[in-house]
Image: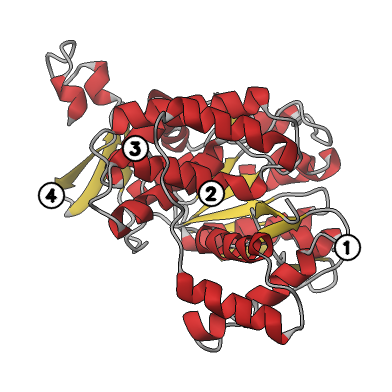
Amino acid sequence: MSAASLPQVESSQAFTWQSQLRHRWDDEKRHCFANICDAQIRYSYEYLGNTPRLVITPLTDRCYITLTQSLHLIMGGAPAGPAGTGKTETTKDLGRALGTMVYVFNCSEQMDYKSCGNIYKGLAQTGAWGCFDEFNRISVEVLSVIAVQVKCVQDAIRAKKKKFNFLGEIISLIPTVGIFITMNPGYAGRTELPENLKALFRPCAMVVPDFELICEIMLVAEGFLEARLLARKFITLYTLCKELLSKQDHYDWGLRAIKSVLVVAGSLKRGDPTRAEDQVLMRALRDFNIPKIVTDDLPVFMGLIGDLFPALDVPRKRDLNFEKVIKQSIVELKLQAEDSFVLKVVQLEELLQVRHSVFVIGNAGSGKSQARHQHQPVPSATRIPNDPPPLTFLSPSIAQGHGEPCRVAANTTDASSTKPESVRAGA
């Protein structure tokens, strides 16, 4: 309801109000509907759980309008822009707001028209949405056939058919089906979409969002009262790190990294509610980023932390019992329990608390494998029993890292890991 408090909103017909996603209950049709501009979409009542929501920025509002208008016109939506601008997440969040399940498919040049056809066939029969990530990585020859498949589904929705002929097979149709594609234009290995495919999708240009606004609202959601000042310091630090630190493949100062640190800051605040908020955020920024900073960049990073948070010297949060178990494990393997090595094992555990998977990076002989081996005996005493062992690949293949489609069985082999964080060994 924040839009209604703006001075330019004088009636319910004002565009500032009309452009908001509004839910209402229709007594005659006995259904919930979502209205935005001139589009009206029936709520789908899919139970999606108590999922987190996106921070709504002006860019999010614009994307919502474009995607809902594309559904209203029985077209697909095509958000396009650089990585980390929220193309996929905005599509997923709109689906959650409309009670619709959104399935995300990571596209690659290995996808053919048969595998895509099977996906469209399933979406049409369930009424769910499909979001095809990096759609322009598919080869041009396949995209031309995909255009025919997508048009077949859209024509059936326009004709309000209950069943339709999809490439020689009669299947049922639930008209809530939506097909969305995201693209990273200008990247290596990307192709230009054919004209017959472009005509089926409404484009939406996505740019880098307002990180400070997102950071401020997420800090408020985590329970911080001085969110505006702390958000400015947070984004200033990450901007300076991006400009002043060396260029490393594993450095990430984007939106995903920001969100991870905010989650850590929230858990630290709940674990120590009496500590000052600037100390909590400073500890999260320092302890979460130090593991991935290379040795040469560490003085610069600590200098930036000291400038933004002057006269603050917050001790690192330590779990002495955990460190004791690590040292016992090291001694049992007849190794030396040096403080720097114990710290790396602790940092590995801390990163695994907020990341699904972790890269351990370092030169040969710096203790990468041993750090992971020391971490293995510990979870039995501190975590859930019967935890599955981790998969380890020395020189992993593309299939192990990203997954691959099986042309014989017409299904997909999942990847071993996704969106890992980095910890640097031997630093």
SS of the residue under disc 2: helix
Looking at the image, tell me whether mark 2 or mark 3 is earlier in sequence order.
3
Give the residue at mark 1: 395
Q: Nearer the viewer, residue 337 or 246?
A: 337
Give the residue at mark 2: 288
Give the residue at mark 3: 278
Q: CA distance from mark 1 to mark 3?
A: 42 Å
Give the side of residue 136 with respect to residue 212, left or right. right
How many numbered marks have been drawn onto this rendered protein structure?
4
Crowd band around label 4 with a 10 angstrom C-alpha radius: few (<14), some (14–19), many (20+) = few
Q: Are marks 1 and 4 in contact (CB under 8 Å)?
A: no
SS of the residue under disc 1: loop
Foreground tag (1 vs 3): 3
Q: Quadrant of residue 386?
A: bottom right
Crowd band around label 3 with a 10 angstrom C-alpha radius: few (<14), some (14–19), many (20+) = some
Colour scheme of the rendered structure: secondary structure
Looking at the image, tell me whether mark 4 or mark 2 is earlier in sequence order.
4
Give the residue at mark 4: 28
Can you give x and y, in whole percent of width and height, for residue 46 in the image? Answer: 35, 61
Looking at the image, tell me whether mark 1 or mark 4 is earlier in sequence order.
4
SS of the residue under disc 3: helix
